[in-house]
Amino acid sequence: MTTTAVVHLVRHGQVENPTGVLYGRLPDFHLSELGRQMADRVAEAFAAVELVHLVSSPLERAQETMAPIAAVHPELAVHTDGRVIEGGNQLEGNKVGLKMVLRQPALALAFRNPLQPSWGEPYTQIVARMKAAIHDVAARAVELGGSGAQALVVSHQLPIWMARCDAEGRRLAHDPRNRQCTLCSVTSFTLVDGRVAAVAYTEPAADLQPAKASKTFVAGA
């Protein structure tokens, strides 16, 4: 018998980051006031959706984004999965740009292969862990709610975009400025018998997006 499941990948909301550093997996980076409003908007969008399973990255900004979603689904526990965490990045804690390289010339080596990328966790490794997590979340959703069940995962821009690129047959190497994955956006994967059959994208917090700022090639959140 054919089974279907929908796994909604939600990017977290805006983070309080007054110094503008690449925070990556660093602790103690929390949602800003605007970020909390974005999370509330996602919660509103999913309030009437029959979710059966909730999963979050272990990082604070993801957990805080999940909080209002979980509040409108009090019957569900929130499960933490390290496989949906932000991509590893050796430039964490720095303002990435030419000034950084001039101050720390050794970091220039991090840019030697942008196709991998050489500054952090390989794209292929991110894809592998995200595919496994999405598959497991979908299987658990079917187990809990039967065919057609829906689950929600709060993750981060790069892992979500890598999962989408893989599912849609896109090249993994890319310019981060071209990712279609805004703050608190929802990238929904429909799986049929455990395989991704369709991907959809929505922006519940579209009107709350901050003004676009210049991004470096390795920016990620």
Image: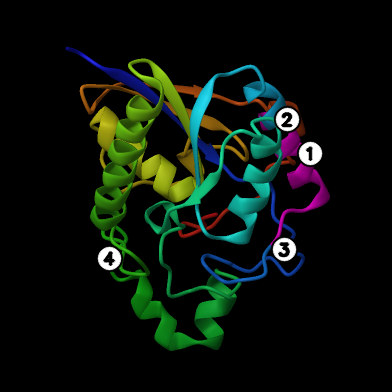
Label 2 packing within 10 angstroms: few (<14), some (14-19), many (20+): many
Q: Which residue is mark 3?
A: 17
Query: Percent from the top left, x then y, of residue 184?
Result: 62, 37
At horizontal 52% and vertical 65% (from top left) the residue drawn is 24
Please state the extent of the stretch shown in magenta in the rendering. Answer: 30-42
Q: Which residue is mark 1?
A: 37
Query: Percent from the top left, x then y, of residue 163?
Result: 34, 40
Q: Which residue is mark 4?
A: 113
Label 4 packing within 10 angstroms: few (<14), some (14-19), many (20+): few
Label 1 or label 3, whichever lies nearer to me, is: 1
Q: Give amino acid for label 2.
A: Arg
In whole angstroms, how far apart are the C-alphas of marks 2 and 4?
38 Å
Helix, strand or loop under label 2: helix
Magenta stretch mostly in which secondary structure? helix
Q: Which residue is mark 2?
A: 41
In whole angstroms, how far apart are the C-alphas of marks 1 and 4?
38 Å
